[in-house]
Every structure is written in C-alpha cells, then in structure tokens.
Image (tube, helix red, strand yellow):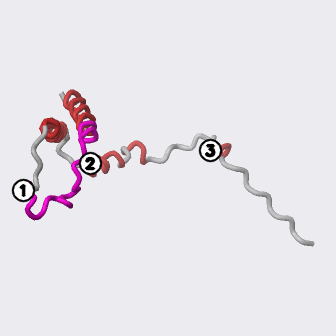
Amino acid sequence: MENVVLVIHLILALVLIGIVLIQRSEGGGLGIGSSGGGSGRSGRPASTPMAKVTWFFAIGFVITSIALTIIAARNASSDSVIERLGSDLTPPASQTETPAPTGLEGDLLPPTPAAPPTAE
C-alpha cells in the first residue's frame, strides 16, 4: 500500500512541476505591479483551466503527503530512532569478554625496533 501511494505521490510531483513550468507568466511576482488606481481590473486574475488543473494536482499532492505520513507513523515502532540506535550500539555480553590467547597474536604484531647503536 505504501509503495502504491509513494508512486502516485512521485507522479503527482512530476506532473505538478511540469504544469507549473508550462503556465504562462502573468507578471507581478508576489503581487508586485498589480493593478492600481482606476484601471477597473481586480488584483486577482480570472481562473484559467490550467490553474484549475494545477490546483487539482496540488490538492492530490498534499493528500498523498498526508497519507504517506500516516502510513509511516503506523509502521514505526513505539521507540524513537535514538533509542533504537542506543540499543544497536551496545555490544552483546559475549563480545565484551577478552578472547583467550591462541599463541598467534605475537605473529601479527609488528617487529620491535632494534636498539640504536651506542656511542663508544
């Protein structure tokens, strides 16, 4: 179920990006340059079919985002990530004991350096 919603979410995101990029710029970013004075035009332009499609995909994107959050919350265990990390970092008791010497440890150590020559 989570994978289906995730795929739909990704498709909606890509389509939403494409639709926003296709739309014609109407100028006046952030409301700058909106009609002032007595031009007879309101500050909000008429809703175009492309704007309605954008709203449709945006609402679908928000719904799938909320659905993914709910699914992730249900699948999560009751403890936090920090608690899970703390338990994973603690080694089991069998690993804390020192191993018995096998006689091979001396072969694995680097050779001891020779003593420097003494001055006579």
Q: Observer-nearest residue: 109 or 43? A: 43
Q: Nearer the viewer, residue 111 or 51?
A: 51
Displayed quadrant of residue 10: top left
Quadrant location of the C terminus in the rendered image? bottom right
Disc 3 residue type (three-letter): Glu
Q: Secondary structure at mark 1?
A: loop
Residue displayed at 86% across by 65% down? 117
Instruction: Check disc 2 and report the residue beneath it.
Output: 81
Counting from the top left corner in percent of width and height, residue 105 is at 62, 44
* Nearest-to-viewer mark from 3 and 2: 2
Number of the label disc, if any, that sits on residue 119: none
| Residue to which mark 3 is pinned | 105
Label 2 sits on a secondary structure element that is helix
Q: From the viewer's perspective, is residue 78 above or below residue 35?
A: above
The amino acid sitting under disc 1 is Gly
Amino acid, disc 2: Val
Residue denoted by label 1: 40
Q: 64 left or right of 113?
A: left
Identify whether 108 is placed above or below 42: above
